[in-house]
Every structure is written in C-alpha cells, then in structure tokens.
Image: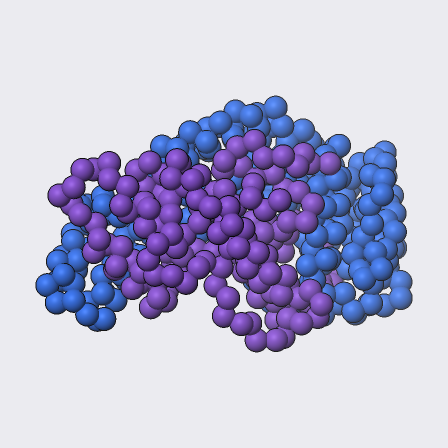
Amino acid sequence: MAPTTYTEEVVCVPRAGTLYDVMELILDRGMVIDVFVRVSLVGIEILKIDARVVVASVDTYLRFAEACNRVDLERDRTSRTVPELFGGGGGGAGAVAQGLGKRKVKKAVGAVEDKVKRAVGEGDEDDEPEPDDEPRPRRRTGSAAPARTRRRSEED
Amino acid sequence: MAESAAIAATAAPRSVYVYGVVHARRVLPPGRTGVGEHPAPLRTLRAGELAAVVSDAPAGLRAKRRDLLAHQELSLALAADGPVLPMRFGMVAPDEEMVRRQLESSHGDCLAALHRVDGRVEMNLKAVPAQGDLRSLVREDPEVARLRTAARRTPGYETSLRLGEAVARGLTRRATATAAAVLAELSEVADERVAGPEVPGCVLNASFLLAREELRRFRDVVERLAAEHGGHVELRLTGPLPCYSFVEPAWAC
C-alpha cells in the first residue's frame, strides 16, 4: 500500500480517503473497453481545483484590486506587505505560508472536501443545489488565501 | 467531464465491474473489496497469462465518492506490488465470458502494456497561478500598471473591477509561461509524459511515467522548481499513482 506520510511540501502521496487531486485521472484516464458499458456520469460536477486566480468573480477581482492598490512600489523590495495580504506566496513565500494558522487552512480543506463529497454524489444528494460555500474565507483583506501546498499535510 | 454522455450501466444480474488487468500469477491484495453499497468481494478472471480483477457489478452503480475511492484504492494496492493496467472508473462488462474474450483478443497488447508500466509509476503535476508576488506584476505588466494608476486616480467599483481582472489575467499569463518551463525541465527526468485532462484553474496538468527508483530524484527536482518559481506558480505533485495515463486508451476488439 502507498505510504501515508508527507515528506515534501509539494508532494502529495495518494492515501486512503482522498481523491482530491486525482479524480480527473480516475474518471478520464485508465483503460477503456469499447464493448463494455460505462457507469453513467451524468450530472456529476466535480470540484477539482480551488483556484482563486481563475475563478472569475467580482469578489476575486475586487480583492485583487485592493491588494494591488496596496502595493507600494517605493518601499523596500523585501517588504512583506503583499505576501501577508494573500497569506503566502511571493518574496519570502515559504516562511510566510508556513506561519499561517492551521485553523484557517483546516477550515478551507473542510469546505473543499465537503463540496467534493456532494459533487460526487455521496448520500445520493448530488442533485441538490449547492450552497455557496467557497473554500476560501470571504474576507477581502487579510489572509484570504491559505497556503495551498500545505493543505494535505494539514488535513490529518 | 468528457464522459458525461456515457451510457447508463444496465446492471444485469451477471454483469461484472472490471478494476484492472494484471499478470495471471498475481495474488489479490488481502482485505480489499470492490465498489457498491455492500462492497462486493473481488475475484480474478484468467485468460492465458492475464487476469482481470473484477467483482459483481452492484445494481444501480453510480460514480459516488465511496465507489471512486474503492476503485482508486484497489488500483493503488494492485500497483504497489506489481504492474497493473488500471481501468477507467465505471467499466462494466455484461458477463464474465465477455471479459475473458476481451483478454484473449488483446492478449499481446495487454502483456506489452504491462511490460511498459512494470517497475514504473505515474506522477501527476498540477500548476496553479501563485498570487503572492503582486509587486513584480505591477512592475512588469504594463496593463496592470496603467489600470492601477487609473484606479488610484479615480477610485471606484468600475476601475477596481478592471484592475482586478487585469491582475487575474496577468497572474495566469505569468503562471502559464513558467509552467511551460517547468514542464520542459521535468520531461528530461521522466521516461514519458502526457497531458492530463484540462482542469479548471490549472495552468498545467501533466502526468509523468518514471521508474520507481527515480521517484526520489524526480521529487527533488519538483521541489527545487517549486522553490525557484514559487512567486509565479504553485506546484502540486501527486503520486506515486497507478499508471492511469500510460495504458492504451482502448483494447482492440
């Protein structure tokens, strides 16, 4: 069986109970036999990636604009203002990201997992409209984005 | 998903769910069960040097989380101690005889495919735009710089929205370019690579085939690239996986 420990920041070892990063491979890759029938995937909507950049929402754009406006080009390049705003990334990304509260990360993970569960139809409830529970905290300022690469190590 | 128009499986009493194909001599990992509300016991159907790992197909099977997990975990377990050709989720054969006939008719191809993945693993890499380094984006992206100036001059909803859109575009563009460089470098340390299905939000989804002994080295390279390019792109490496992306797309019929 696959090992279940995480030794690297960006490496996720697949383990029992998680589908998050490989669902599209299970559904879209693998061997196919033409003469066999396939279980219907109709109506399945799978949340695959919690991508805040590409999510085209007014909320996202306004958050970006606000952060962008706060960038002070005159200040020292090593300023942490922007990375702090986004809760990670940028300049001293690693250190800042790791300093994030676990609680926040966990909360985000919970929401994502929950959404995935519903999306793949656990409990036969996948026809229900999905409540608006974006995995990221809705605050427009402050640490809006938990460090994604840490997610799996925080899931436990 | 590409398969959204797939035919609904008719769960005839004799139908079997197929998990993967292995060498006939393989022993099933103990304690594993298959898909379904009451997980079905697993068995193998042999034909020549091949065996299909199957269970009875439960009535009314759908792609539930529970079943996706059962499929994935069995594939992982099978891949952990020998080569396996994992099936795509949800393949149901009308009866055992049909599975055996398929194994026989594609015997040579399947053996070759098993040989190809023997001792190898799949590693999947996804890249999403990083959001941290806005300072350099403002410096380097003329559109962002222009709209930022405009937004400061005339603060308001409309100017903020335009600026925010430009930032999102800029971050994605930058991440896409960086991901291409990452992909090129990683291709040097893998035996093969293929593009994964498009995933919303990802600027890169790629799978790599590499020898199990190369795992350490591959991870190290990804770690280095993640550190080097962290300002532009966030990398997520998943694996070792069963070689979903490196089996033939279809059996000869």
Q: On screen, B62 above or below B102?
A: below
Query: From the viewer's perspective, is B219 left or right of A69?
Result: right
Q: Position of residue B229 (x, y in %)?
A: 35, 36
**Residue pictured at 12% horizontal, 67% vertical:** B154
**Residue pictured at 85% horizontal, 60% vertical:** B38
**Quadrant placement of the N terminus of chain B:** bottom right
**Residue pictured at 68% horizontal, 59% vertical:** B65
Q: Quadrant of residue B22?
A: top right
**Residue pictured at 63% horizontal, 56% vertical:** A27
Q: Position of residue B36 (x, y in %)?
A: 80, 60
Would residue B164 be seen by someone viewing this image from the given angle?
A: yes
Question: Is B162 or B169 nearer to us in this picture?
Answer: B162
Q: Chain B appears in which tint? A: blue
Q: On screen, B62 above or below A23?
A: below
Q: Position of residue B69 (x, y in %)?
A: 70, 52
Question: Is B143 or A63 nearer to us in this picture?
Answer: A63
How many labels, in total? 0
Query: From the viewer's perspective, is B234 left or right of B82?
Result: left
Query: From the viewer's perspective, is B9 left or right of A55?
Result: right
Kindly indicate which chain is depicted in purple in the rendered structure: A
Q: On screen, B153 above or below B142?
A: below
Q: On screen, B215 above or below B158?
A: above
Would residue B251 be seen by someone viewing this image from the given angle?
A: no
Question: Is A152 or B226 nearer to us in this picture?
Answer: A152
| Display colour scheme | by chain
Q: Farthest left residue?
A: B153
Q: Quadrant of residue A126?
A: bottom right
Q: Position of residue B9 (x, y in %)?
A: 75, 67
